[in-house]
Amino acid sequence: MSVNAAAQRAFNFSAGPAALPLPVLQQVQEEFLCLPGAGASLLELSHRGKPFVGVIEEAEATLRSLLGVSDDYAVLFLQGGAALQFSMIPANLLRGTEATAQYLLTGSWGKKAIVEGEKEGFVEAIYDAKASNYDRVPSAGDFTVRDDAAYLYYCSNETIQGVQYPDEPECPDTVPLVSDASSDFLCRPLTINKYGLIYACAQKNAGPAGVTVVVMRRDLLDRGSESLPGYLQYRNHAAGGSMWNTPPTFAIYVLGKVARWLADDIGGLAAMEKQNKEKSKLVYDAIDANAGFYNGHALPECRSLMNVTFTLPNDDLQNRFIDEAAEHSLVSLKGHRSVGGIRASIYNAMPREGAETLANFMKDFAAKNG
């Protein structure tokens, strides 16, 4: 990437596809025409050939190291995003059983997931934050999980509402804990052995659109019925090393680069979490210092490290905020169309300077318009 091109880059607060680390983009640019030692671009290489096999094996190994994933779990690189996982999970873990799958609903993505679960068997929402307009996540005493549930499903970070679980919800050992971690995957350490299955579509925080990471306990792989279409059976992908069909090779390649950046440049997920807390605090402090002008959506104890959501007193001020922010190279701040307002997505790749610039702009904007 040329110096001029890098200098033209704005602070991109898009919720996804989202910002990627600049060092990763630069390395991808350098290797784009010819992957070192391969004689061709990664885009032109067979997924069965030695160069790409090396790419996918390194990506998996780096993810396993970052997250502490043992051999008791399969790491899969799939397509279809979260939308496919909404269906694929109940198809494998619920279809054909008499068990009930239980869901914790804390925002838009959890609500979409349970609709697909209903098509496969018995489901129930054992917690729904609808009454408070999805501004919180549950406390331990707010729900009860059945010992014989097919699984307990939750979305760890709701991008639209800007709420995040600080820790995994309590779940009996007999029940697989299933999580949509799409928008906070790799933002902090995880206790993987608490999960039966955790997945993340990469374009929020881990790479480009096109690949979804699924980390699944191996003893769950065989639950899927033989009647399922081949692509929908997790065990086929595990047996085929994520090559049951042609995988999204370029997206996996970039995801591997992002994982390596986290390991080598950042120093691991604990170091990344520290940075993320510092960045989000800058913006939340600007909201709190101008309460009444800026109104944060999430309760303070449920605030997301990744997606800071808030409103201004009226639509005119919100539109002016977005326009003037763009003049300061602060872009993609418009809230999701379903809820409006402002949303600043401060993913791993957002530099501290971007959060500082946004916080300072917010303070100045409030002083001029409050």
Image (cartoon, rainbow, N blue to C red):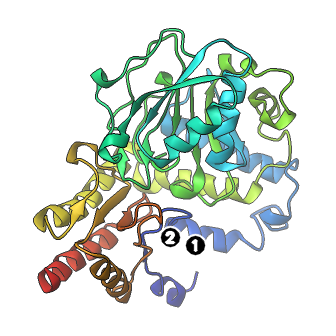
Q: Secondary structure at mark 1?
A: helix
- 224 horizontally vs 18: left or right: right
Quarter of the image for residue 112 reads: top right
Q: Within 10 angstroms of label 1, few (less than 14), some, or many (20 or more) residues?
A: some
Number of marks in picture: 2
Q: CA distance from mark 1 to mark 2?
A: 6 Å
Placement of 218 over or under 16, stated as above or below:
above
Amino acid on which the number 2 mark rests in the picture: Leu
Placement of 4 over or under 97, stated as above or below:
below
Return the x and y of residue 361 as percentages of the image width and height: 24, 79
Residue located 49% across and 36% down the image: 67
Return the x and y of residue 366 as percentages of the image width and height: 16, 78
Residue 314 vs residue 293, the one in the foreground:
314
Placement of 359 over or under 139, stated as above or below:
below
Return the x and y of residue 19 as percentages of the image width and height: 50, 67
**Quadrant location of the N terminus?**
bottom right
Q: Secondary structure at mark 2?
A: helix
Placement of 153 over or under 313, stated as above or below:
above
- What residue would you read off at disc 1? 26
Residue located 86% across and 33% down the image: 230
- 265 horizontally vs 321: left or right: right
Residue 100 vs residue 287, the one in the foreground:
100
Q: Could you tell me if residue 253 is visible in this image? A: yes
- What residue would you read off at disc 2? 22
Q: Are marks 1 and 2 in contact (CB under 8 Å)?
A: yes
Q: Which label number is shown at residue 131?
A: none
Residue located 71% across and 25% down the image: 92
